Image (cartoon, grey):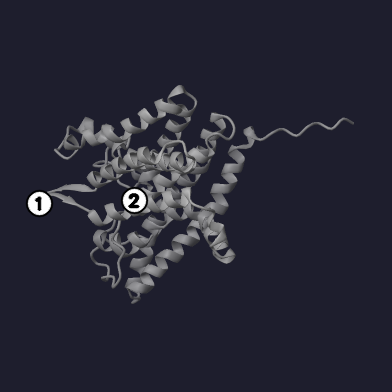
């Protein structure tokens, strides 16, 4: 949220007032994928694979679909001259998550949503792997190394104006992000002593190298690296590894802070889905009414949190409960 409100906002919309303080590092969405993979490993053995997979879909998909519709309506209700004004074809394309496959034709209603199909594919792959022989032991290690090294070996093709079919498949399946999922799995395996320190260090170095290459951009001036974001993700991965392997942090975090973090974590997916596009409209309206950069950023943070809380309460939790009903144990009949 800080990156979107203080840095990306002024890049996408140069008419915004300059921010006296910025957070210029693209780290939040990347760490989201690492954390998702880690907790997929923590929870995947609980119950059947069908229940696990459906539980992830029931958690992610309804909120995403609702967020797309709500953002579409808000952008049309509060249009800003010169900004993206979504049409019905944009609504359909976003509901079907077509952006990665053909970005030249399908625009994001909200740019934050790019992680949703990757998460769904990641949870699907995890379920299929865990249910097969390839999700355990040495075979799983081979899968992990392949998932990191295969995109790395193809990096020269990716940055050298590849054919459209190749680009569509690579971006559609998110090959250049696979290393983030592998980092989360590696952290879980290391924290549970399933791999040794040396093997974990090797995987981590490979994942970090892949992240460094991913953050190179092919520009008219040549290849440009975003080392600030790369190092920020490296730090985030290391912190997550230390926290996962270390002692229970409840001992050192005050109870009030625990409650606040737990509450925000509970609505974080809704906040993630709702804050960016609508937040930019909020900031622009505030600027048009004379409010400075600080109030604009605060307005985006508050509105994003409020909308995320509402999406969680009204859609995410009720939809998840409803969709998981077939997997709930049936109550025993009491004899008359």
Q: CA distance from mark 2 to mark 1?
A: 25 Å
> At which x and y percent is residue 45?
55, 34
Quadrant the C terminus occupies? top right
Q: Relative to 205, does residue 147 appear above or below in the rendering?
A: above
Looking at the rendered structure, the secondary structure element under dot 1 is loop
Looking at the rendered structure, the secondary structure element under dot 2 is helix
Tell me if mark 1 has few (under 14), some (14-19) or many (20+) residues whose alpha carbon lies within 10 angstroms of its own.
few
Residue nearer the viewer, 278 or 187: 187
Q: Relative to 130, does residue 28 appear above or below in the rendering?
A: below
Q: Identify the residue at image location x=51%, y=33%.
A: 53
Question: Is residue 116 rendered to the left or right of residue 26?
Answer: right
- Tag count in the figure? 2
Mark 2 or mark 1, earlier in chain = 2
Q: In the image, which is nearer the foreground, mark 2 or mark 1?
A: 1
Q: Identify the residue at image location x=38%, y=30%.
A: 141
> At which x and y percent is residue 164?
20, 33
Q: Which of the 4 image quarters holds residue 122? A: top left
Tell me if mark 2 has few (under 14), some (14-19) or many (20+) residues whose alpha carbon lies within 10 angstroms of its own.
few
Q: Which of the 4 image quarters holds residue 23? A: bottom left
Q: Identify the residue at image location x=24%, y=36%.
A: 152
Q: List the residue tagged with mark 2.
A: 111
Question: Is residue 127 rendered to the left or right of residue 26?
Answer: right
Residue 110 shows in the view: no
Residue 175 shows in the view: yes
Residue nearer the viewer, 222 or 242: 242
Q: Relative to 240, does residue 326 appear above or below in the rendering?
A: above
Tag 2–tag 1 contact (CB < 8 Å): no
Give the label on residue 221, or none.
1
> At which x and y percent is residue 132?
47, 23
């Amino acid at each position: 949220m800080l990156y979107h409100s203080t840095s990306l906002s002024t890049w996408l919309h140069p008419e915004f007032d300059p921010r006296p303080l910025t957070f210029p590092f693209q780290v939040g969405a990347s760490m989201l994928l690492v954390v998702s993979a880690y907790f997929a490993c923590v929870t995947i053995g609980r119950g059947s694979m069908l229940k696990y997979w459906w539980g992830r879909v029931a958690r992610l998909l309804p909120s995403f679909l609702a967020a797309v519709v709500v953002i579409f309506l808000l952008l049309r209700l509060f249009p800003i001259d010169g900004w993206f004004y979504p049409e019905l074809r944009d609504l359909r394309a976003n509901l079907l998550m077509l952006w990665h496959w053909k970005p030249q034709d399908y625009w994001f209603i909200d740019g934050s949503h790019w992680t949703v199909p990757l998460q769904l594919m990641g949870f699907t792959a995890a379920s299929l792997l865990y249910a097969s022989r390839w999700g355990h032991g040495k075979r799983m290690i081979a899968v992990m190394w392949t998932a990191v090294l295969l995109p790395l070996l193809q990096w020269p093709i990716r940055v050298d104006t590849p054919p459209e079919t190749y680009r569509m498949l690579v971006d559609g399946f998110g090959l250049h992000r696979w290393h983030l999922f592998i980092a989360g799995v590696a952290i879980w395996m290391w924290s549970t002593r399933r791999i040794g320190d040396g093997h974990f260090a090797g995987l981590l170095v490979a994942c970090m190298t892949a992240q460094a290459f991913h953050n190179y951009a092919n520009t008219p001036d040549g290849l440009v690296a975003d080392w600030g974001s790369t190092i920020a993700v490296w730090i985030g991965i290391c912190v997550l590894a230390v926290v996962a392997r270390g002692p229970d942090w409840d001992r050192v975090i005050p109870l009030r802070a625990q409650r606040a973090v737990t509450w925000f974590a509970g609505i974080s997916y809704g906040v993630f889905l709702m804050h960016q596009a609508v937040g930019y409209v909020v900031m622009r309206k505030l600027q048009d009414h004379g409010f400075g950069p600080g109030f604009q950023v605060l307005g985006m943070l508050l509105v994003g949190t409020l909308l995320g809380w509402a999406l969680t309460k009204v859609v995410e939790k009720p939809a998840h409960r409803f969709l998981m009903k077939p997997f709930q144990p049936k109550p025993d009949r009491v004899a008359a």
